[in-house]
Image (cartoon, rainbow, N blue to C red):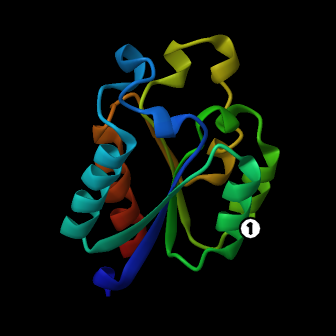
Amino acid sequence: MASQHRVLLLSGPNLNLLGSREPSIYGTASLQEVVDLATREAATVGLTVEHRQSNRASDLVEWIQQSDHHAIVINAGAFTHYAWSIHDALRSFAGKVVEVHLSEPLRRESWRHQSVIAPVAHGTIAGFGDEGYVLAMRAVSLLLAR
């Protein structure tokens, strides 16, 4: 039953600074406001959300390895572009994975153009700001319904 599906929402480095860090790129909403938006949307599609944030890749890897959730939605921040340890942990995760970004990495610096997360994700949502998290929860719902 869809109401029993649990999603682990992971936020990587510097996302704790949302609302104050480069609002012209990342928006003015705080991380808690973004999480609340995602959680409300998740509830409308029968999902529950647990959120965790860390500036350390090792924390994200451990949370992924320990997860018994049905899906992971991850904004790995800068780790997206080089943290192969997160790639490997997600590759071993049995559930669905959706990568999300507030900005569109392909419209930014060239070093942001490659994602090591994308090859192990079911899909990537980028460039929609806060609404990307709404779309990510809808995507997880659709993936789990298949």
Quarter of the rendering occupied by the C terminus: bottom left
What is the quadrant of residue 42 in the picture? bottom left
Q: Which residue is found at the position 67% from the left and 53% from the top?
A: 120
Is residue 146 shown to the viewer in this render? no
Q: At 74% from the left edge and 67% from the top edge, which residue is drawn?
A: 92
What residue lies at 49% left-to-right and 40% top-to-bottom? 16
Decide if residue 54 is in sight here: yes
Is residue 11 toward the left or the right of residue 67 in the image? left
Image coords of residue 139 (percent x, y) = 37, 56
Quarter of the view holding residue 33: top left
Residue toward you, 16 or 125: 16
Q: Amino acid at mark 1?
A: Ser
Q: What residue sits right under mark 1 in the picture?
A: 92
Residue at the limit of the structure toward the left, as seen here: 44
Secondary-structure class at tag 1 = helix
> Percent x, y for residue 81?
70, 32
Q: How many marks?
A: 1
Q: Quarter of the image for the N terminus: give it.
A: bottom left
